[in-house]
Image: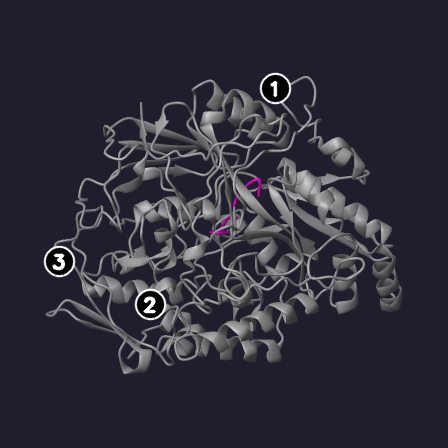
Amino acid sequence: MARHFCSEIPHMRNKQTTGAVPAHGLSGPITIHSYTARKAHRYLQGSRAVCERRVRHSRCSELPLLALTGHDNEAAPGKNARRTHINRGMGMKNRTSFAALTSGIALAVFATAAPAGAQGTPGGTLRLLAKAAAGTIDPHINYTLQYFQINYILYDGLVTFKKAGDETGFDVVADLAETLPEPEDGGKTYTFQLRKGLKFADGSDVTPEDVLASFQRIFKVSGPTAGTFYNGIVGADECLAAPADCTLDGGVVIDEEAFTITINLTEPDGEFLQKIAIPHAAILPAETPIKDMGTEPVPGTGPYMIESYNPNERLKMVRNPHFEEWSAEAQPAGYPDEIDYDFGLTEEAAVTAIQNGQADWMFDPPPPDRLAEIGTTYADQASVHPLTAMWYAPMNTNLAPFDDVRVRQAVNYAIDRSAVVKLFGGSNLAQPACQILPPGFPSYEPYCPYTAGGGDTWSAPDMEKAKALVAESGTAGQEVTIIAEDNTVSRAIGVYLQDVLNELGYEAKVQAISQNIQFTYIQNTNNNVQISISQWFQDYPSPSNFLQVLFSCASFNPGSDASVNISGFCDESIDAKMAEAASLTLTDPEKSAELWTEVDKAVTDAAPAAVLFTPKRVDFISSRVKNFTFSPQFYWIMSQSWVE
């Protein structure tokens, strides 16, 4: 998923920015700032942060190295440990704390969860902050980490990921279904027994009819994963061709008397349960309107419900009066009575609000120049978590100059990824990368064709090679606009890329667009975006979730705000190999994993994007938040924290 943060979202993952909502679907103006050229060294000197946009301090503090215990990938499988899904090695067990930043002393492992047997007291209000809202609150459309995090406690699917703070957080468990079904018909049929007695937040009963209508609605509203996650359901092709007429006849079959739902697939899909465990497969009332609900709450089945939403001010969640816990693994009862999500504060102001006890958590990462202060004075309130994610610069393969593969490769050669890592906060908060799959991920093998001197991992830029490719392409002198989010980190990276493109001979400029709409803006081909800055965070641990979702022909939807293939990349030969890899998940997982490795290399060579780095997550919480539980799938499970 994309990430809506100092970044995904819709948009999860993001892994950014806004939900898949049209710009005109949000109230308030769209803010676009243009920045003139300035040298990147202003942002890079001595690992200093961007000072001129700071609010609180009178000077920039040096960002020291963060001393972290363990190794980022100590539990991650190596390149020979091939798995195509449920990678237990990805659990964030090496959760670490800030402390002794300037001395570089090794630190004790950060553990936020309460001691065994500890029990919090339900009640109170959890106060969250984000610089901007993440667009639509329609769970079938929003594709942002920011709202995926809350959708997991607002809505339920037939199955979900276990709400756990260890590697079992990647396990799929039964949710609205009583049990996990065994696949039948060679892996093409799943029959779910729906739990009885469940109610939506509006008091209506949950029935098999709601399940059928919800799967139909995924296609009718042109959900961003309809063509990549759910296109294997019988009848999906017709639904994709004519969404308004979608019936999924023969694909989703319900039995009202037996209270069952049978889903038939055209081909076996070893990842199907993971795909329906994300919020895009949330079960909603059958009468939910067939449109993007925008700011209008939709009743769910989780422990919380949205009481009100104004994307310019606040999203307010309160307890669902009809919720009764049916599975502590799938959907445990929550602790806070109310969760308020306020929008509009800068990252600087958010840090200060948490320090002063006026807020409890911020979605956006703290500004780099505040990390030293947080790590020394508030060490017991901060944690760092390695993520299976990437920051990248998608290039539009259908617009000049990036319709020429030589130009896209030139950009990859020219980028100094260590400089970009410094802009993000330093080498302990990010790792340079130049391939699609992140380290430790299933099918990952180190590969980087864009580094000086050769090698499997990135070490340095090769500007000479980059300039030679641009000269061959004959595209020098063309104008290029970089679309960034209007926040400290994304703007700084945008200005750095501007300098790189200028050095390559282009006339580049940066446009910083409000986080509220940036992700949907860069997806829509009508906006003619040439290059942008984006992020992607896994929906579930499978290589298809990076490669197929972001770079397959099926994920490119021209003219749509829900086209996560931002590059517009479509290579039929690579698509065929993706399809083959996916088809072998159940029958020959080893061969499937090998094919995904080949796809990763092929996409990297075609360069529809420039991967910049793999990030780590910095969470800063107030002193009154207890039992902060970090899941490898959900990140913070906010319903399981209590406030004192």
Q: Camera-side residue: 151 or 579?
A: 579
Q: Is residue 432 magenta?
A: no
Against 246, is 89 above or below?
Answer: above
Provide the secondary structure element on which disc 3 rests: loop
Q: What amino acid does circle 1 point to?
A: Arg
* Picture mark count: 3
Residue 102 is situated, as x and y percent measured from the top left of the image, at 63, 25
In-image side of 386 versus 611 (left or right): left
- Mark 3 crowdedness (10 Å alpha carbons): few <14, some 14-19, many ≥20: few
Asked whether residue 404 is in view, the answer is no
The residue segment tinted magenta is 4-14
- Mark 2 crowdedness (10 Å alpha carbons): few <14, some 14-19, many ≥20: many
Q: Kindly identify which residue carries mark 2.
A: 216
Dot 3 or dot 1: first in sequence order is 1
Residue at image coords 26%, 48%: 331
Distance (Cα) linking label 2 and label 1: 50 Å
In-image side of 503 versus 224 (left or right): right
Q: Is residue 6 magenta?
A: yes
Q: What amino acid does circle 2 point to?
A: Gln
Dot 2 or dot 1: first in sequence order is 1
Dot 2 or dot 3: first in sequence order is 3
Q: Kindly identify which residue carries mark 3.
A: 196
Residue 67 is situated, as x and y percent measured from the top left of the image, at 58, 34
Q: What amino acid does circle 3 point to?
A: Lys
Q: Quadrant of the C terminus?
A: top left
Distance (Cα) linking label 3 and label 1: 54 Å
State the predominant SS element of the stretch in magenta. Answer: loop
Asked whether residue 143 is in view, the answer is yes
Distance (Cα) linking label 2 and label 3: 22 Å
Residue 372 is situated, as x and y percent measured from the top left of the image, at 60, 26
Q: Kindly identify which residue carries mark 1.
A: 56
